[in-house]
Image: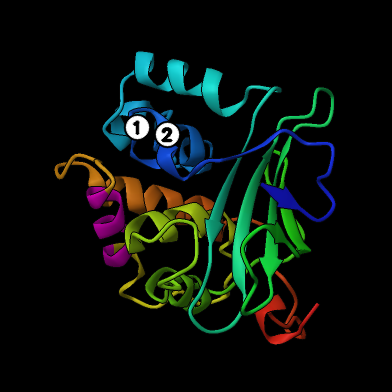
Amino acid sequence: MLIKGYDDGPLVAGEPLTTRPGFWSNHLMAMCDDGAGRPVPEWFGDDGADADAMSEVLFDPGHWPVFRIPAAEGPGVVVVYRNQPGDYGIDYLLTPPGTPPGRISTEQLTRWEGDLAGNGLTWHELVRLADTPAPEAEGAADPAARLLLVLPLLNDLDLPAEAPTRLGAALAAAGSPQETVMHTAESLLTHLMGRSRHDADWGSPLSGGH
């Protein structure tokens, strides 16, 4: 796999990892905040051994997992686990409509290095990405996985009332236990909504804003 700007990175397709035990706790657990207790892998249907084993795969400097979220209309997103020693982070890249297979052309959207650095997307844009996979493009096709992959990008001033239910359904589809799934969804949204807000003149990168 080739991505513009990552010529020296050992990129590998990461989508198969999304169905393996331990993936979602690694991808999302750091964003949980219920105001009371520390999140645990069991919130995502994993256990500690699952999470530790997946960490060794997901953060291996010799392999940089790439998760492609192509969209049928409009830009898609590519998530790159940048496992560079001394410069680790998770990059979120925009892909223009109709991006062909092979060498992926992208522009930097933002990055995650303990928290979101830069602008993100609105809830409605995340749902649009989740629900409009490009049928013939390589990448994640399942709407639940697509929503969870791009969830760290959430940067919205006003979430719709249905957001916790939609997120809970995605988490349940990915393996989170039914008895705790809404608590997990609300914890994720509490953390994401508690971050620094963009100003009123901010425009979404998907609509050409900066």
| Near-viewer residue (94 or 210) | 94
55, 138: nearer the viewer: 138
Q: Position of residue 72 (x, y in %)?
A: 48, 79
User: Can the viewer see residue 105?
Assistant: yes
Where is residue 147 shown, x and y percent of the image? Answer: 42, 61
Q: Quadrant of residue 203?
A: bottom right
Q: Position of residue 73 (x, y in %)?
A: 52, 84
Find disc 2 in the rendering and name its residue. Answer: 23
Amino acid type indicated by mark 1: Arg
Instruction: Give the foreground label among 2 and 1.
Output: 1
**Residues at marks 2 and 1 touching, judged by CB atoms closer than 8 Å:** yes
Q: Quadrant of the C terminus?
A: bottom right
Magenta residues (range): 165-173
Element under label 1?
loop
In the displayed structure, would residue 187 be above or below residue 128? Answer: above
Name the residue furthest left. 179
Majority secondary structure of the magenta segment? helix
Is 104 or 200 nearer to us in this picture?
104
Number of numbered discs overlaid on the protein picture: 2
Name the amino acid type tagged 2. Answer: Phe
Q: Which mark is residue 20?
A: 1
Of all residues, the one furthest to the top in this rendering is 49
Quadrant of residue 208 within the rendered picture: bottom right
